[in-house]
Image (cartoon, rainbow, N blue to C red):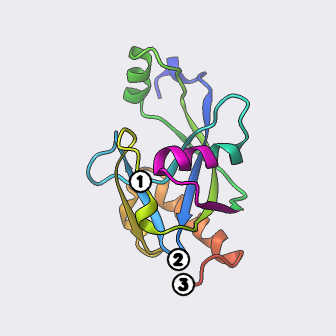
Amino acid sequence: MLPEYENLPYRKGVDVYVMDKNGNFLIVRKSRYDENQWGLAGGGVDEGESVEECVTRELKEELGSTKFEILFRVPFSLKYNFPDDLIKHEKEEGKSMYKGQVKEQFLALFTGDHKEIRPQESELKQIKWVGPEEIEKHFVFEGQTENLRHVLEEFKKHGFLNYN
């Protein structure tokens, strides 16, 4: 990280592992992602908003549905730094600058039918439902896979997952 970015704050955010009643997870390809890059629904916490309120708002904004039930808050967060070129781009655009993100992580159950999800095209290029054993092959960002393994272990430990 460039020295001029070292003292920037971290942006607070949420990542939501959205699970359907069959135990599949929803992964998303955000509008700024390349073809092979996938992540989770979620986003930044607004001023004065709780992380739970952020989960509800982001799911409604990104996925066009309110048929979600928060089941679990993961007891650890995901913290990472942005690449220098992204920080530089945000600076050039006149946006708030952050050195990275600290994301609280949640498990939410989608209680509707898959066809009821209407992705917001300005934020998401594509969505896909995958089994828990398939998520890892879609995650390519640094630290994403290791974090996923820890999160899935938490879900198993608390009885939300039953696969090996």
> Of circles 3 and 1, which is in front?
1
Q: Secondary structure at mark 3?
A: loop
**Which amino acid does the dot numbered 1 rest on?**
Arg
Identity of the residue drawn at 64% across and 43% down:
54
Kind of element beneath mark 2: loop
Q: In this figure, which residue is indicated by the disc labeled 2? A: 23
Which residue position is annotated with label 1? 118
Is residue 126 left or right of 52 when viewed as pictured?
left
- Mark 3 residue crowding within 10 angstroms, few (<14) / some (14–19) / many (20+): few
Q: Answer with mark 2 or mark 3, whichever residue precedes in sequence.
A: 2
Q: Is residue 70 magenta?
A: yes
Residue contact between numbered discs 3 and 1, judged by CB atoms under 8 Å: no
Measured as percent of width and height from the top left, residue 127 is found at 37, 57
Whether label 1 touches label 2, CB < 8 Å: no
The mark lying in front, picked from 2 and 3, is 2
Q: Are marks 2 and 3 in contact (CB under 8 Å)?
A: yes
Query: SS of the residue at dot 1?
Result: loop
The residue beneath circle 3 is: 163
Amino acid type at circle 3 is Tyr
**In front of the other: 87 or 123:** 123
Position of residue 63 relative to residue 93, above or below, is below
Instruction: Tell me the distance, in whole angstroms, between the alpha carbons under discs 2 and 3.
Output: 9 Å
Q: Amino acid at mark 2?
A: Gly
Q: Which residues are magenta?
A: 55-71
Which of pointers 1 and 2 lies earlier in the amino acid sequence? 2
Going from N to C along the chain, the mark reached first, 3 or 1, is 1
